[in-house]
Image (cartoon, rainbow, N blue to C red):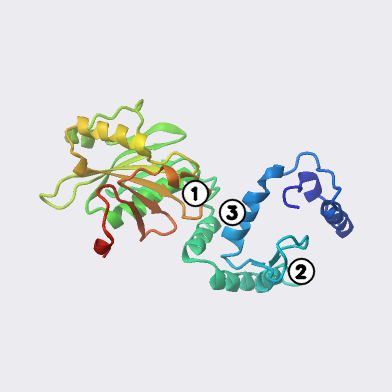
């Protein structure tokens, strides 16, 4: 039924029109409508990714018990407390309170954080994004999810994980070169060429007195483009050309959260020896170790 929905049908509001559609798409001899929302072979993704991995774990849908595998009856149903949110008599403050109770009871910390971000308009914001640098300066980026991720990297990630952070390079989709600290790059002897395969952000951790400098190449992923093995090799060449050794370099790919389509699409491409950080879980960091196998006795 989901794969057969169309814009034309969705615009029909009368109960009779909806019931007629329900009977039509339930029929064994139905005719597939023109311009449906989904391809006919996308039902497996809806079943596996949306229902089994999304709606069921979050308590919105249940799998009905006692049905034979070959039964033509519906296998899935809305959970009772989730279905109750669709009560037409529930509105206003009572509805908002009921939704909040359901969220608190069912959604994970990451999912709740994502909802908070979306409620603030971070997903599809139309306002420019102001980024506060560690040195107190500010920069304005074009609206969009990539800019929101870049803001989170500089304002949330950097102070959490770096001792004395600085922003060497920041780019955005609307402008290849957005901000470039030429003085810092010259001091570090890093040759930055905008025509090269550069990441979205280059952070520098100056550390405490006497510490070695750490260069952090960061890629923010709103759709695709993580730091994979190819990009890692290119960035290593850039840093080694300035005289830095591999121990002075690290790589970070940033996503909104672990449930985002971008992360699911990119996780298999992430380079070994890199970090992954999620804006919705700022205090957690995922590490892909690179090196010799670790025996189980050393797991601790």
Q: Nearer the viewer, residue 204 or 26?
A: 26
Residue lying furthest top in this view?
Answer: 195
Q: Which residue is mark 3?
A: 49
55 sits left or right of 265 in the view: right
Q: Which residue is mark 1?
A: 264
Circle number at residue 123:
none
The residue at the point 37 percent across, 40 percent down is 227
Counting other residues with Cα less than 10 Å from the Cα at mark 3, is it few (<14), some (14-19), or many (20 or more)?
few
Circle number at residue 88:
2
- Of the residues under marks 3 and 1, which one precedes in the sequence? 3
Q: Count how many numbered circles sit on residues in the image.
A: 3
What is the CA distance from the residue labelled 2 to the residue labelled 1?
A: 36 Å
Q: Nearer the viewer, mark 2 or mark 3?
A: 3
Q: Nearer the viewer, residue 127 or 81?
A: 81
181 sits left or right of 259 in the view: left
Q: Are marks 2 and 3 in contact (CB under 8 Å)?
A: no
Pinpoint residue 14: horizontal percent, then vertical percent.
86, 57
Q: Are marks 3 and 1 in contact (CB under 8 Å)?
A: no
**Quick one: quadrant of the C terminus?**
bottom left
Label 2, secondary structure: give it. loop
Q: Are marks 2 and 1 in contact (CB under 8 Å)?
A: no
User: Is 17 rendered above or below residue 171?
Assistant: below
User: Is 76 rendered above or below residue 198?
Assistant: below
Pinpoint residue 83: horizontal percent, then vertical percent.
70, 69
What is the CA distance from the residue labelled 3 to the residue labelled 1?
A: 10 Å
């Amino acid at each position: 039924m989901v794969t057969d929905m169309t814009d034309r049908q969705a615009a029909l509001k009368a109960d009779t029109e909806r019931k007629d559609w329900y009977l039509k798409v339930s029929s064994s001899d139905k005719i597939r409508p023109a311009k449906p929302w989904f391809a006919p072979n996308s039902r497996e993704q809806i079943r596996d990714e949306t229902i089994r991995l999304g709606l069921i774990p979050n308590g919105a849908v249940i799998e009905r018990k006692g049905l034979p595998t070959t039964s033509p009856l519906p296998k899935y149903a809305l959970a009772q407390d989730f279905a109750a949110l669709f009560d037409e008599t529930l509105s206003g403050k009572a509805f908002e309170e009921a939704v909040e109770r359901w969220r608190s009871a069912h959604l994970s910390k990451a999912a709740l954080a994502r909802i908070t971000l979306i409620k603030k308009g971070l997903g599809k914001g139309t306002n420019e994004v102001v980024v506060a640098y560690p040195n107190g300066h500010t920069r304005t980026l074009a609206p969009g999810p990539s800019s929101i991720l870049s803001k989170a990297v500089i304002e949330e990630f950097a102070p959490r994980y770096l001792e004395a952070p600085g922003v060497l390079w920041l780019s955005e989709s609307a402008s290849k070169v957005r901000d470039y600290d030429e003085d810092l790059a010259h001091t570090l002897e890093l040759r930055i060429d905008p025509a090269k395969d550069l990441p979205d952000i280059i952070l520098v951790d100056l550390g405490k007195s006497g510490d070695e400098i750490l260069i952090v190449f960061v890629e923010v992923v709103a759709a695709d483009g993580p730091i994979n093995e190819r990009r890692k090799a290119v960035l290593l060449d850039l840093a080694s050309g300035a005289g830095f050794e591999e121990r002075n370099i690290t790589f970070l790919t940033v996503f909104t959260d672990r449930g985002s389509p971008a992360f699911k699409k990119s996780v298999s491409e992430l380079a070994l020896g890199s970090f992954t950080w999620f804006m919705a879980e700022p205090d957690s960091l995922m590490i892909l170790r690179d090196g010799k196998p670790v025996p189980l006795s050393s797991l601790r």
